[in-house]
Amino acid sequence: MNGIRAKLDRIAGSTGFIPGSRNRISKLKGGVRGKYLARYRAGTNLVLLSPDVAGYFPDEQSVSTALRALIHAAKRPLRRAR
Protein backbone atom coordinates (compact mmCIF):
# COMPACT_ATOMS: atom_id res chain seq x y z
CA MET A 1 0.00 0.00 0.00
CA ASN A 2 2.83 2.42 0.75
CA GLY A 3 3.97 2.35 -2.88
CA ILE A 4 0.54 3.38 -4.14
CA ARG A 5 0.24 6.14 -1.56
CA ALA A 6 3.71 7.47 -2.45
CA LYS A 7 2.78 7.50 -6.14
CA LEU A 8 -0.46 9.38 -5.42
CA ASP A 9 1.46 11.88 -3.30
CA ARG A 10 3.88 12.53 -6.16
CA ILE A 11 1.00 12.94 -8.64
CA ALA A 12 -0.86 15.26 -6.27
CA GLY A 13 2.17 17.50 -5.83
CA SER A 14 1.70 20.60 -3.73
CA THR A 15 -1.98 21.09 -4.61
CA GLY A 16 -3.26 17.94 -2.94
CA PHE A 17 -5.29 17.16 -6.08
CA ILE A 18 -5.56 13.51 -7.00
CA PRO A 19 -6.60 12.84 -10.63
CA GLY A 20 -9.89 11.01 -10.88
CA SER A 21 -10.87 12.02 -7.38
CA ARG A 22 -14.23 13.67 -6.78
CA ASN A 23 -12.77 15.61 -3.87
CA ARG A 24 -11.49 18.81 -5.46
CA ILE A 25 -12.01 20.85 -2.30
CA SER A 26 -8.31 20.58 -1.55
CA LYS A 27 -7.68 23.00 -4.44
CA LEU A 28 -9.62 25.76 -2.70
CA LYS A 29 -7.43 28.24 -0.87
CA GLY A 30 -8.04 31.21 1.39
CA GLY A 31 -11.51 30.25 2.58
CA VAL A 32 -12.78 30.82 6.09
CA ARG A 33 -14.47 27.82 7.64
CA GLY A 34 -18.01 28.58 8.79
CA LYS A 35 -18.05 32.12 7.33
CA TYR A 36 -21.67 31.80 6.14
CA LEU A 37 -22.90 29.27 8.70
CA ALA A 38 -25.14 31.75 10.56
CA ARG A 39 -26.79 32.87 7.31
CA TYR A 40 -27.30 29.27 6.25
CA ARG A 41 -28.94 28.38 9.56
CA ALA A 42 -31.14 31.47 9.35
CA GLY A 43 -32.49 30.23 6.03
CA THR A 44 -30.76 32.76 3.81
CA ASN A 45 -30.17 31.55 0.27
CA LEU A 46 -26.54 31.65 -0.77
CA VAL A 47 -25.78 31.70 -4.46
CA LEU A 48 -22.37 31.49 -6.08
CA LEU A 49 -22.25 33.77 -9.11
CA SER A 50 -20.07 32.94 -12.09
CA PRO A 51 -17.05 35.23 -12.27
CA ASP A 52 -18.28 36.96 -15.44
CA VAL A 53 -21.63 37.74 -13.79
CA ALA A 54 -20.12 38.71 -10.42
CA GLY A 55 -18.00 41.34 -12.19
CA TYR A 56 -21.12 43.43 -12.77
CA PHE A 57 -22.05 43.61 -9.09
CA PRO A 58 -19.90 45.35 -6.49
CA ASP A 59 -21.86 44.02 -3.48
CA GLU A 60 -24.82 41.90 -2.40
CA GLN A 61 -27.17 44.90 -2.31
CA SER A 62 -26.68 45.58 -6.02
CA VAL A 63 -27.40 41.91 -6.80
CA SER A 64 -30.61 42.05 -4.80
CA THR A 65 -31.67 45.31 -6.48
CA ALA A 66 -31.09 43.87 -9.95
CA LEU A 67 -32.98 40.68 -9.13
CA ARG A 68 -35.93 42.63 -7.70
CA ALA A 69 -36.11 44.70 -10.90
CA LEU A 70 -36.04 41.52 -12.99
CA ILE A 71 -38.80 39.93 -10.89
CA HIS A 72 -40.90 43.09 -11.19
CA ALA A 73 -40.44 43.17 -14.98
CA ALA A 74 -41.31 39.47 -15.29
CA LYS A 75 -44.59 39.94 -13.40
CA ARG A 76 -45.87 42.62 -15.77
CA PRO A 77 -48.27 41.41 -18.45
CA LEU A 78 -46.83 41.19 -21.94
CA ARG A 79 -47.97 43.86 -24.41
CA ARG A 80 -49.18 42.62 -27.73
CA ALA A 81 -47.72 44.03 -30.93
CA ARG A 82 -50.14 46.00 -33.05
Image (cartoon, helix red, strand yellow):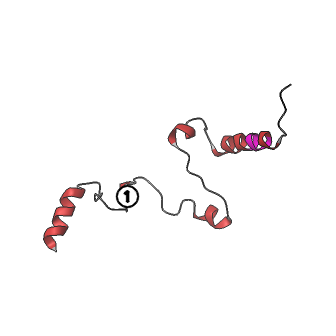
Q: Position of residue 12 (x, y in %)?
A: 24, 57
Please tell me which residue is depicted at 84% across the width and 31% down the height of the picture: 80
Q: Position of residue 55 (x, y in %)?
A: 55, 36
Name the residue nearer the viewer: 48 or 80.
80
Please tell me which residue is depicted at 76% across the width and 40% down the height of the picture: 69
Name the residue nearer the viewer: 20 or 32.
20
Tag 1: amino acid: Arg
Q: Position of residue 16 (x, y in %)?
A: 29, 58
Please tell me which residue is depicted at 55% across the width and 50% down the height of the picture: 48
Please tell me which residue is depicted at 66% across the width and 43% down the height of the picture: 63
Q: Quadrant of residue 81?
A: top right
- Element carrying mark 1: loop
Instruction: Determine whether, in the image, residue 65 is placed left or right of residue 22.
Output: right
Q: What is the span of residues highlighted in magenta in the rendered image?
A: 68-72
Q: Which residue is mark 1?
A: 24
Q: Quadrant of residue 19?
A: bottom left
Q: The N terminus appears in which quarter of the rendering? A: bottom left
Residue 3 in the image: above or below residue 48 = below
Q: The C terminus appears in which quarter of the rendering? A: top right
